[in-house]
Amino acid sequence: MTNQAVPARPHLLPAVAACVTVVLWASAFVSIRSAGAAYSPGSLALGRMSAGALALGIICVIRRVPPPPRSAWRGIAVSGVLWFGFYMVVLNWGEQQVDAGTAALVVNVGPLLIALLGARLLGDPMPPRLLAGMAVSFAGAVTVGLSMAGGGGSSVLGVVLCLLAAVAYAAGVVSQKPALARASALQATTYGCLVGAVACLPFAGQLVHQAADAPLSATLNMVYLGVFPTALAFTTWAYALARTTASRMGATTYAVPALVVLMSWLALGEVPGPVTLAGGVLCLAGVAVSRSRAREGAPRTMTTVGEPRSEQVP
């Protein structure tokens, strides 16, 4: 009786952390639209990373969290430059060139790239359920993207930028995974955010000038992006990633398009059509299929996923 109760909590917490990440990342799409009207892609990325680094830095000081060990710095630095820096700038730029549906469709190549890179570089398994779930979710993401796409032609530049964002996202995740074997989620996120902010420093002049003229709502959205979808959501992401494979975590983010549709419906009054709703259901169904293997092999998951070092995560 006692032995059965022990593994439930370690499996539940990463799932909750992944859900928090997905919900907050979905909410970021609304905030990026608002803040992007007043801030350029680079300045928005710098403002977001600065707010996130400040919030995380305060937590680290209060909790007296030491810097990550040297062995974790390579992964943190690479993910910081690619994911916290380059990805943010390119995604902001891409969303100014194409409609939200096209951007979401192209960026959702990311989880597929994570699975391929994870299998190649990290030795992640590619079980049939994961592949099937990713296929279903990708079909849903394509459906949502096409249904939300505007009537005008998409900018080639915008599509290329969103594709670059997807590549940077995948490379950042795969780079961060090994670092989480030695650094906590809080350490990896805090210093990754700092690296991203430093990488975005060339846009400091733009940020200062645009902040002086930007409406308060845009600035508040930028701060929100830094504190919640970045500081909190990237930390919960790292916490969950340390306890599962990069491929399965990447598949989880396919729930984002479905949640964006729901949030637009509730917050903006944008009623989705039946095709959009069907695509959202496919996204969620695919995520459920891709993660269902954890319930089937609980004892094995504990040995392969529950690494001893991950207990240091705050």
Image (cartoon, rainbow, N blue to C red):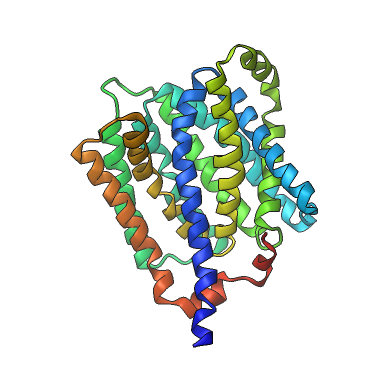
- Which residue corresponds to the image point at 56% horizontal and 61% vertical from the top-left? 122
Furthest residue toward left: 274
Residue 262: percent from left, percent from top: 33, 41
Tell me: 125 left or right of 144: right
For this orientation, the residue located farthest to the bottom is 1
- Quarter of the figure that contains the C terminus: bottom right
Task: Please give left or right for residue 42 compared with residue 248 in the image.
Answer: right
Q: Is residue 60 left or right of residue 118?
A: right
- In this view of the protein, can residue 135 be seen by the observer? no
Q: Is residue 95 above or below residue 68?
A: above
Q: Please, is residue 264 above or below residue 44 in the view?
A: below
Residue at (43, 22) in percent of width and height: 97
- The x and y percentages for residue 124 are 51, 64
Residue 272 visible in this rendered orientation of the protein: yes
Q: Residue at x 43, y 70 (%)?
A: 294
From the viewer's side, name the closer residue of 55 and 191.
55
Q: Position of residue 200 (x, y in %)?
A: 67, 29
Q: x%, y% of residue 135? A: 32, 54
Location of residue 279 by image quarter: top left
Residue drawn 29% across the image and 39% down it: 144
